[in-house]
Image (tube, rainbow, N blue to C red):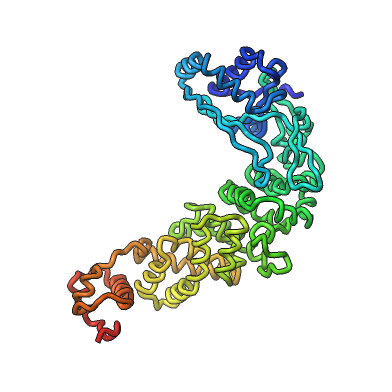
Amino acid sequence: MTSVQLPLTPAEKLFRQCLLDCREQMQDIPGMKDLVLRWTGGWVRDKLLGVQSHDIDVALSSMTGLQYGQAMQAFMKEHGSKYEEEAIKQGINPQVKDIHTIAANPEKSKHLETITTRMFGLDVDFVNLRKEVYDEQSRNPQMEFGTAEEDALRRDATVNALFYNLDTQTIEDFTQKGLDDMKKKVIRTPLAPFQTFKDDPLRVLRLIRFACRLGYVIESSAQEAMKDKSIHEALRLKISRERVGVEIGKIMAGPDPYTGLRYINTFDLYATVFGDPMTSDGDFAVDADQALVAYEGLCRILEEKSSICLVLKPKEDQSLSWFLAAYTPFARSSARAEQASREGIKATNKMSKTLKDAIDLRPRILKAVKLVNEDQATRADVGMALRQCREAWRSHVLFSLLCGIVEEDFSIVTDRYQKFVTFIHDQKLEDANTVVPILNGNQIKDALGGPKGGPWLKRAVDILAQWQFNNPEAPKDEAIEMIAGKKQELRLV
């Protein structure tokens, strides 16, 4: 094992000492005497990268997470005041929460019960070292106690399979490749890639996520296995869509969404990930390459088109922006797009509705863009279009722009939309969706002679809003006079 040392924060040092003291004091509990304590996974990787992590997985060699968690809880009830005083003295959060059990849920690819707690500002999981025994007849593995090496080899990537031994305070690299892969910036599976993905197809998306998060390259044999159709089918049918959605959400919210989403297309996973899982590949008629064009377009907008970004703010909700780019191939059918996003990646109601409305309202946006570019637009033409989009107007315009980039040359389309967003900015229409009508419902009725309410009232409000956009400084009496002259148009005479 390597002699690489990791510098611990004061909170980590106190937590380490607490774990070792618990083992020393609770020797009468079965499994405690020979227990080897290790921190593992993402904490070790991030520590080596110089990134601070507040999540620590504690791997236990001879006890379950529940057994050790209960022992730790009993230990802290008796000795906790000592650690609390030390924490306060060092300026560390002294809070120690009771343990909490998260049950196994094989149907959602969570194969082992986890014991969680929070100590000294650190989120902690206790779990025993394990190996996964797969049965071809079953979707889910049997979890058994394993050695540290078996636990390391069952993990998704070598860089996630490193251990920090609390006794020796050194890193243990049981795959013999993790530290080297970190130096070379490579994502590699500890075992043969095809079998690794066959055992748990979600690992395909996890490796993509880690690659774009860390800026690493996926090793070539893993890339080839990721393209295998049987792996795609297993991902579509075996893994819950909630789990797929979590990985995609992390990619879209991460430091390099473009690379992660491009990988999905490169490995021919677009239909598997973003399509409705109940639709077979043969029925999947959208062109996945259109998504690639949209991704490249969004990248260029973020890098080159500051004036568009200033108005549309695509970085403000980064995940939503990349989500909309991913679903540009569905732009011909809002119903199908909404269904695919809900079922494929379990998108939130807000995201799915934004997508559906963006498709439905695109003709209205295109008309407004055309008028602006022909120098024929009034303030009302654009204001009413944005008003119809409500609070999601920026996302709707961005989606329309990305669809345009898929359909035409990038420069031509972005020039067109740049003029459009400049009009919005110059005419102070960014808050068009929040403009309150100058007259309320009763005032509109009074101006029209007191008719009963009906469908005409909504039309009257729209007429008023349109007039108001073109006459933003006009007083209320002019609005009353204008509405009073609309009786015939509203069919009230």
In this orientation, does residue 266 appear?
yes
Query: For residue 26, which quarter of the picture?
Result: top right
The quarter of the picture where the N terminus appears is: top right
Q: Specify the quadrant of the image occupied by residue 420.
A: bottom left
Residue 312 location (% of width, % of height):
46, 59
Q: Is residue 96 above or below residue 335?
A: above
Can residue 52 be seen here? The reply is no
Examine the rendered structure and indicate whether residue 485 appears above or below residue 251. below
Closer to the camera in the image, 436 or 37: 37
Depth order, front residue of 277/419: 277
Residue found at x 68% / y 61%: 271
What percent of the width, then of the height, locates residue 421? 43, 65
Q: Depth check: 100 or 47 in front?
A: 100
Left or right: where 313 falls relative to 431: right
Q: Is residue 420 left or right of residue 460?
A: right
* Residue 222 at x, y percent in the picture: 78, 47
Location of residue 201 with respect to 440 vertically, above or below:
above
In the figure, 425 relative to 118: above or below? below
> Measured from the top left, where is residue 162 in percent x and y?
71, 31
Left/right placement of residue 320 relative to residue 219 reads: left
Residue at screen point 69% across, 53% down: 263
Q: Number of marks in the image?
A: 0
Q: Residue at x 52, y 66 (%)?
A: 356
Q: Quadrant of the C terminus?
A: bottom left
The image quadrant that residue 482 belongs to is bottom left
